[in-house]
Image (cartoon, rainbow, N blue to C red):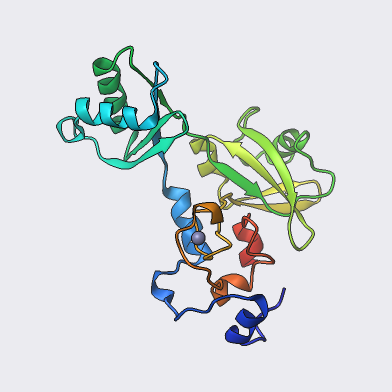
């Protein structure tokens, strides 16, 4: 939807937005959000009670028994879950120290579960019609001998259609394969397709900020920034693809 020709205030009136004074300095652009997302890994630990205790009891128990300063672990997030707590640390090492400490001191009472890190995802841009998740790997292997790929290096996840009616395909790879493939072009059928990082940023349709949904929103209703809005058809959607927005 083209919005660039309409003055911002007029547009806001049409759509029922409440216009606030511009605070552009603390409003992030889509590109900034997704760039940070690529490089920020999350190291999370779920803690549940073996005795069906509520999250607040687990919180009190952990506070009493575990001292993050003593074990030199930085806590990024400490949140309540439906049946427990979730703790996020800075590194895999800190996560292991914390998990071991909880297991040693709260044995039998609490159960810990470190989240596995998901492999990186890449997106292959503008794939030919005949390519599917089923035949992608064999096609890549057959036509790209210059890229040192082996069977099993890439796992095709899903295809999706872009706003320009082209198709992209998302693959999951190891960190090593990501390095090999990132920003390369691969030959598929009669086409050469670019490969980029696949990142998804959630956008709130109430306040237009990133990384949370409207149901968790603590902000005020706000028009999306003009730069971000020109590239999104509908701010209620989760924006899916950096390429579609920058193309
Ligand atoms: Zn919000």
Residue 146 in the image, given as x and y percentages of width and height: 63, 41
Residue 200 in the image, given as x and y percentages of width and height: 57, 51
Q: Residue at x 56, y 75 (%)?
A: 227
Q: Which residue lies furthest to the top in this view?
A: 108
Q: Say if 95 sits above or below 205 in the image.
A: above
Find residue 9 and report its image quarter: bottom right
Is residue 201 something one can see in this rendering?
A: no
Q: Say if 196 sits above or below 148 in the image.
A: below
Task: Pick the residue in front: 156 or 138.
Answer: 156
Task: Pick the residue in front: 41 or 187.
Answer: 41
Is residue 238 something one can see in this rendering?
A: yes
Residue 147 in the image, given as x and y percentages of width and height: 61, 40
Task: Pick the residue in front: 169 or 148.
Answer: 169
Q: Residue at x 84, y 48 (%)?
A: 129
* 209 with respect to 110 (left or right): right
Task: Tell me the quadrant of the picture where the C terminus can be found.
Answer: bottom right
* 140 with respect to 28 (left or right): right
Residue 114 in the image, given as x and y percentages of width and height: 41, 27
Q: Residue at x 39, y 69 (%)?
A: 26
Task: Tell me the quadrant of the picture where the N terminus can be found.
Answer: bottom right
Q: Say if 77 sits above or below 16 in the image.
A: above
Find residue 67 and report its image quarter: top left
Q: Residue furthest right?
A: 130
Number of marks in the image? 0
Task: Pick the residue in front: 14 or 114.
Answer: 14
């Amino acid at each position: 939807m083209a919005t660039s020709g309409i003055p911002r205030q007029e547009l806001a009136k049409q759509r029922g937005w409440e216009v606030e004074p511009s605070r552009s300095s603390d409003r992030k652009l889509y590109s900034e959000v997704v760039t940070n997302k690529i490089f920020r890994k999350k190291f999370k630990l779920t803690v549940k009670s073996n005795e069906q205790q509520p999250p607040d009891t687990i919180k009190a128990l952990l506070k009493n028994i575990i001292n993050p300063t003593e074990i030199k672990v930085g806590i990024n997030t400490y949140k309540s879950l439906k049946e427990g707590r979730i703790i996020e640390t800075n590194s895999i090492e800190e996560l292991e120290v914390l998990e071991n400490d909880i297991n040693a001191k709260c044995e039998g009472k609490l159960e810990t579960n470190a989240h596995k890190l998901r492999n990186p995802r890449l997106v292959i841009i503008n794939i030919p019609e005949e390519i599917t998740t089923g035949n992608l790997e064999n096609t890549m292997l057959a036509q790209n001998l210059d890229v040192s790929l082996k069977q099993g290096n890439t796992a095709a996840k899903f295809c999706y259609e872009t706003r320009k009616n082209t198709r992209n395909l998302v693959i999951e790879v190891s960190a090593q394969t990501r390095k090999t493939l990132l920003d390369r072009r691969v030959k598929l059928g009669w086409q050469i397709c670019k490969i980029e990082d696949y990142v998804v940023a959630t956008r709130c349709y109430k306040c237009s900020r990133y990384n949370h949904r409207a149901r968790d929103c603590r902000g005020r209703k706000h028009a999306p920034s003009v730069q971000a809005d020109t590239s999104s058809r509908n701010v209620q959607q989760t924006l899916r693809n950096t390429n579609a927005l920058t193309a």
